[in-house]
Image (tube, rainbow, N blue to C red):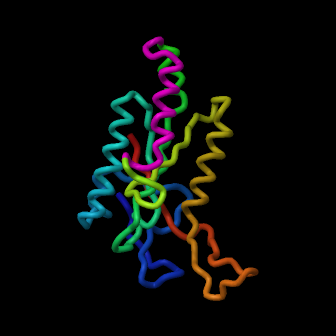
Amino acid sequence: MLPEMVISQFDSTLRVLPFAKSPHRATWEELEATFGDTAERKTMLYLARSRLEAMIADSVPVAAAWVNGSFVTSKQSPSDIDLVVILNGPQVAQMWQSGLIPHDEVMKRIRHYEEQRYEPGGTATQHLTDFHYARWFPKDHGLHASSYGELEYWSSCWSRVKVESDAHTEEVPDFTRYADCKGFVEVRW
């Protein structure tokens, strides 16, 4: 169950999920119930879920999805829904090691989805879903350190808040990022 949102320390008109050391876990249904309160948000959720289900139907081993951005705030009209799709690294290897799917085909399927950052027809300036990808490996796996680093990167990025500067000049950036200011959601498959 998702926690109650709190008032952002940088914008008293905005509510955000409270910061936590790890993502707030929820089911897709809880995500829909909490953040699917407008037709626009429902469309974003539908598109995101459809993309995830297409990956799963194509035997891509989705372990979880991290959901973030303005979508998981009280912002009335978020521009999109941001996700990091976390692939189960050991299951990727098992797919071809089992002999069911050749290695080249497994990698082709995964690359196909990784190259689709936005929904079909979406562009960098006009889209409703924005997908990124990371692989997860358990602690006893040789690739754990790199996968842990990748997940730490996304966790750190998604816990930050970007605040615009009133004093923007060539020497002063137009915004400042503050760490550990908000939470985000994890949905497992």
Q: Quadrant of residue 123?
A: bottom left
In the rendered image, which quarter is residue 38 located in? bottom left
Q: Position of residue 11 (x, y in %)?
A: 49, 82
Of residues 63 and 51, which is closer to you in this image? 51
Residue at image location 37% in from the left, 49% down from the top: 121
**Picture layout, residue 4 above or below residue 136:** below
Q: Nearer the viewer, residue 9 or 125?
A: 125
- In the displayed structure image, the side of residue 38 where residue 77 appears, left or right: right
**Residue nearer the viewer, 116 or 137:** 116
Q: Position of residue 177 (x, y in %)?
A: 63, 71
Up-down: is 65 above or below 128? above
Residue located 37% across and 29% down the image: 58
The residue sitting at the top extreme is: 99
Where's the C terminus, which quadrant?
top left
Residue 99 drawn at (x, y percent) = 47, 11
Residue lying farthest bottom? 167
**Which quadrant: the N terminus?**
bottom left
Residue projecting furthest to the right: 171
Placement of 97 over or under 159, stated as above or below: above
Q: How many marks?
A: 0
Q: Residue at x 49, y 63 (%)?
A: 183
Q: Is residue 110 magenta?
A: yes
Q: In front here: 136 or 50? A: 50
As drawn, is 101 to the left or to the right of 37? right
Q: Residue 164 occupies which quadrant of the picture?
A: bottom right
Magenta span has 115? yes
Q: Which residues are magenta?
A: 99-120
Which residue sits at x=49%, y=24%? 106
